[in-house]
Amino acid sequence: MSSVPDLSLAQDIFLLRTPTLPPALLEESQKRLITAIENGNKAPLYYYLHTSLDLTQIPWDEEKYKAMVAKNSEHLQALEKTIAEAEEAGGEMEVAEGWIKVGEFWAGVGDKEKATFTLRKAYDLTPGLGSKIDILFTIIRVGMFFDDKSAVGRELENVKVLIDRGGDWDRRNRLKTYDGLYSLSIRKFSEAADLLLDSLSTFTSTELCTYEEVVQYAMLAAGVALGRVPLKTKVIDSPEVLSLLSTTPSIEPLATMTNSLYLCDYASFFKALVEVDESHLKVNRYLAPHAKYYVKEMRRKGYSQLLESYRALSLKSMAEAFGVSVEFLDNDLSKFIPQKKINCVIDRVNGIIETNRPDNKNAQYQLFIKQGDLLLTRLQKYGTAVRMSGSERVA
């Protein structure tokens, strides 16, 4: 499987476009990006950063750009010569492989349009189902590099169609990681959690991210999406997570967050959530757009979990449990209550929080009625279809 484009460079570009981050972090990204551009002769990417993003941390040098363009042209001529020779020899497979290499070349140097166009041409020329899937995976990575979510979503649907026709075991597993990362990037945390957790034991998609990174993505998605019991079985007790705890320091805040939430240690949970926000959410290009939502939803989750055990409790005792002031808690709960995200009311006169959870029997009754209505609708449609079928036979 090809590893172009280098998605770690897309992360560096994101960091450099976020000047509020620590200077040391930005300096490291700047060095990595400049080195990658120069060593890889990435003239199109260099031009894109200068003209489209106006990334001032990457200084423009016209002579350097022209030299990289010349080297790109030389390499491209060699690839096109190979294709011409394959066409003369009548080797259809070799021609298709030649166009794949051209498409991967453009993807590697950072030309989105030429990479996508050439890879689509290679796709049309390629007879094998597996090779077609691999080409689509490369097009998806190009979309990911340039944060083109609509293109990524569209091509993922195309991959799913091909996988259903007969994709092999490896490509089916890769699809889980691709789809999981895409779901994470568009705030579908429940889908992301299922896909990423399922991919951990068979992870091979190193062209997307490292194994340590995909474990962290899975933990983040699961933290907000899963209930208390599945969080314990699928994350806290996960062999994949446990195996990294002693060797991967960046996982520690995530482990503390999930463990403290499960153990109802809400003060530690809030502290870990702040650290996760700083160390994982704000600095990650997939998660940064959703950082505020994620933190807010995790606070709501913690509040709801504690309130499930009480009919009423004082604002003071709940504030102490979370390690915050009464004023903060009062203000924060007020953001959720009007939207019915938390089933409680605040008696500010007496400083009491009263829960108003729906009665279980009433909830079951409402579900029964809803399911009954659905069944009746289906039966009516079935009856109509039967009558129409009978009419056609009579006619």
Image (spheres, rainbow, N blue to C red):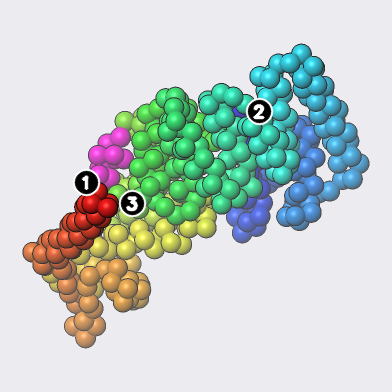
Q: Which mark is residue 229?
A: 1
Looking at the image, residue 5 lies above or below residue 81: below
Q: Which residue is mark 2?
A: 125
Percent from the top left, x then y, of residue 160?
Answer: 46, 38
What amino acid is found at the position of numbered circle 3 in the picture? Ala
User: Residue at coordinates 79% horizontally, 34% vertically from top-left?
Assistant: 41
How far apart are the two marked residues, 1 and 2, measured between alpha carbons? Answer: 50 Å
What amino acid is found at the position of numbered circle 2 in the picture? Leu
Question: Mark 2 or mark 3, which is nearer the start of the sequence?
Answer: 2
Q: Which residue is mark 3?
A: 225
Quarter of the image where one finds residue 337: bottom left
The extreme bottom residue here reads 349
Quarter of the image where one finds residue 341: bottom left
Percent from the top left, x then y, of residue 38?
Answer: 78, 35
Question: Mark 2 or mark 1, which is nearer the start of the sequence?
Answer: 2
Q: Which mark is residue 371?
A: none
